[in-house]
Amino acid sequence: MSGSDALTLWRNARVCLSGDPSDFISPGAIAVSGNQIVWVGRDEQVPSQFTSSPHREHDLGQAWVTPGLVDCHTHLVYAGSRAEEFERRLCGASYEEIARGGGGINSTVRATRAANEETLFRESARRLEPLLAEGVMAIEIKSGYGLRLADERKMLKVARQLGERYPVTVYTTFLGAHALPPEFAGRPDDYIRVVCDEMLPTLSDEGLVDGVDVFCESIGFTIAQSERVYETAAKLGLPVKMHAEQLTNGGGTHLACRYKAISADHLEHLDEEGVIAMKDAGVVAVLLPGAFYFLRDTKLPPIDLLRRHNVPIALATDSNPGTSPMTSILLILNMACTLFRLTPAEALLGVTRHGAQALRRSDRHGTLAAGRFADFCVWEVDSLAELSYRFGFNPLLLAVRNGEVIRKVQFQK
């Protein structure tokens, strides 16, 4: 065994196997060969085949180890800023008023269309880097600020480039049905026709699309228009997601459930009937406390109903310029606990096992087990609850991705 396949033993750790803090081994060990975990278990039970063959060992000094973190809902690729709209909202303007007045998503569309690929990559990379510094190893990035073929392609290409040039797995989601572009003002059905007949098939054929999302909302697209997008995605064999029930209870979640969507996201106005439909259809709830906080919302998602009906709850930054200019997954854990009253254990599951479910990538991310890719975080904390408890503080000691150390911090003792 040599080169990239050399065995590495990570020993003397508190290994959290699935993101659930109660599911851990201490003292635990992880054996890694190449980019895969080949064994996880108690430190004193490491098989002799691993200790007798040439290998490297690392003593983690009883540090906590979790799966690499997952940010399952972002709009990370865009150009420009919406700070002026932030000021307007503070003075009393609503998000809907700003959007209907030509601001909102369309202001970012103008800036993104005007940016070349190099500029877009540079601005997006600056937002990605702090997420990686906090242990994010898998991230979903949506399009939706181009709203025409060339610019949606540009966004998706930049998202792919981020995954090629940074140590992170990027999943791309086509969100052409994000807003009505100005050239289609008053003609939403015509625009959806272009999305379904031109944009989505072309970008899918070019290998730029892993999934499809729709903003089904009072200021977005109707149920019928959203279903047209879903029908096209189904023909192309692409999984779907849904921005649903953020501003109103418009029934988007029921549509998502009928099409067996991976997730329904936001959900502040979701009712119990919708929660039951999600449970029956196996749809993950993705909660976005950054947007709730930034918009100063007061309508909480139905946390107790989601718990009662055992719907998996994922969390994400929703990193975007208008409603969640957020680049901290750890702050999201704190917000989920303080604003939504999730427990620290639920919050951590939301960015590990359940976050992976919200990408339909549980086979790749979210848990530590033999045969899985060796993606894990090592934390300088006494308890995993500290990841939610403290904010403005990053206790990441080591990040290991595909078996390689990609980030190492030396704390002073």
Image (cartoon, rainbow, N blue to C red):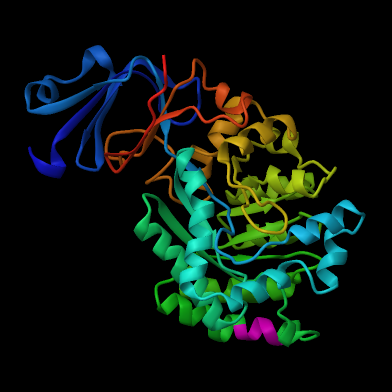
At 52% across and 60% down in the image, what residue appears? 124
**Position of 11 compared to 287: left or right?**
left
Residue 117: x and y, percent? 47, 73
Tell me which segment is drawn in magenta. Answer: 190-194
Q: Quadrant of the N terminus?
A: top left
> What main secondary structure does the magenta stretch of the protein show?
helix
In this view, the residue farthest toward the front is 412
Queried whether the magenta region covers residue 192, the answer comes back as yes
Q: Quadrant of the C terminus?
A: top left
At 62% across and 71% down in the image, what residue appears? 145
Residue 68: x and y, percent? 42, 38
Residue 187: x and y, percent? 76, 86
Instruction: Out of 75 and 121, give the one closest to the viewer.
Output: 121
Q: Is residue 237 visible?
A: no
Queried whether the magenta region covers residue 124, the answer comes back as no
Query: Quadrant location of residue 152?
Result: bottom right
User: Relative to 196, does residue 208 appear above or below in the rendering?
Assistant: above
At 34% across and 15% down in the image, what residue appears? 61
Residue 42: x and y, percent? 29, 16
At 67% across and 69% down in the image, what residue appears? 108
In this rendering, the count of numbered labels is 0
Query: Quadrant location of residue 98?
Result: bottom right
**Position of 71 compared to 277: left or right?**
left
Q: Is residue 284 visible?
A: yes
Instruction: Out of 389 and 130, give the one closest to the viewer.
Output: 130
In this view, the residue farthest toward the right is 92
User: Relative to 50, does residue 249 appear above or below in the rendering?
Assistant: below
Instruction: Out of 272 and 241, give the one closest to the viewer.
Output: 241
